[in-house]
Image (cartoon, grey):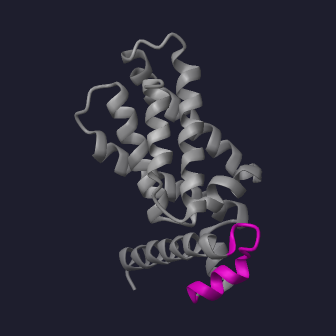
Amino acid sequence: MSTGVRQQRAAATRKQLIATGLALAERTGLADMSVNLVVAEAGVAKGTFFHHFGDRSEFLLALHTEFHDRVFAEIERTIAGMPPGRDRLLAVANAYLDECLRHRGVRALLLEARVDPAILGAIAARNKLVIQLSSPDFAAMGWAHVEPSAAMWNSAVVEAAILELDAGGHRQEVRAALEQFLRGPK
């Protein structure tokens, strides 16, 4: 077997393990997701798992990264060409919320992953990036405290995702509340 074929198979197996993990996160949460359960669901040997991931924490980090990479790609598609400001922030929030609902296992990643030391660094780095990317929106709206505003907005959008995931779907009142935070009371 050629090196190229082996690499393709290895990439497909890694992708399969991550997809299995994301599906299991929805059913079991992260606390009950063992390596044994992942390999049984994926139909691979335990050694295969450890070939791709050094340990369970590395696997959880891969799940977190995969989900957020998908979200960022969708957000980039959604806001391409939009000028900074309120409309762009709302478009980002809606794209994020929609992606969370498409990948219901993310609830475990949003809540349970916050206590895993391996993921905490990734969460902090991702939040820092979100603050950096959304700060120009707050600046364009004339907000005085751009970075703290961006940080609080990020937290509000994540909380909105948790509310929708707990409710089992899209909640217009949650999204309207996010918009009201940016616009102020009517």
Residue 159 placement: quadrant: top right
Any part of residue 53 in sight: yes
Depth check, front residue: 12 or 143? 143
Membership of 33 in magenta stretch = yes
Write down the region rendered in magenta. 28-43
Within the image, what quadrant is residue 107 found in?
A: bottom right
The answer to whether residue 124 is magenta is no
Q: Quadrant of the C terminus?
A: top left
What residue do we see at 57% from left, 38% from top? 156
Rendered position, 89 above or below 169: above
Q: Determine if residue 55 is in view.
A: no
Residue furthest to the left in view is 81
The answer to whether residue 139 is above or below residue 176 is above
Find residue 52 and report its horizontal and vertical position in percent: 59, 70
Residue at point 39%, 37% (across, down): 90
Q: Position of residue 19 (x, y in %)?
A: 51, 73
Q: Quadrant of the N terminus?
A: bottom left
Percent position (x, y) of residue 134?
A: 44, 29
Which residue corresponds to the image point at 43% horizontal and 42% vertical from the top-left? Answer: 93
Q: Position of residue 136 (x, y in %)?
A: 40, 21
Picture quadrant where residue 70 is located:
bottom left
Query: 44 or 75: which is nearer to us?
Result: 75
Q: Nearer the viewer, residue 117 or 114?
A: 114
Drawn side of residue 89 relative to residue 107, left or right: left
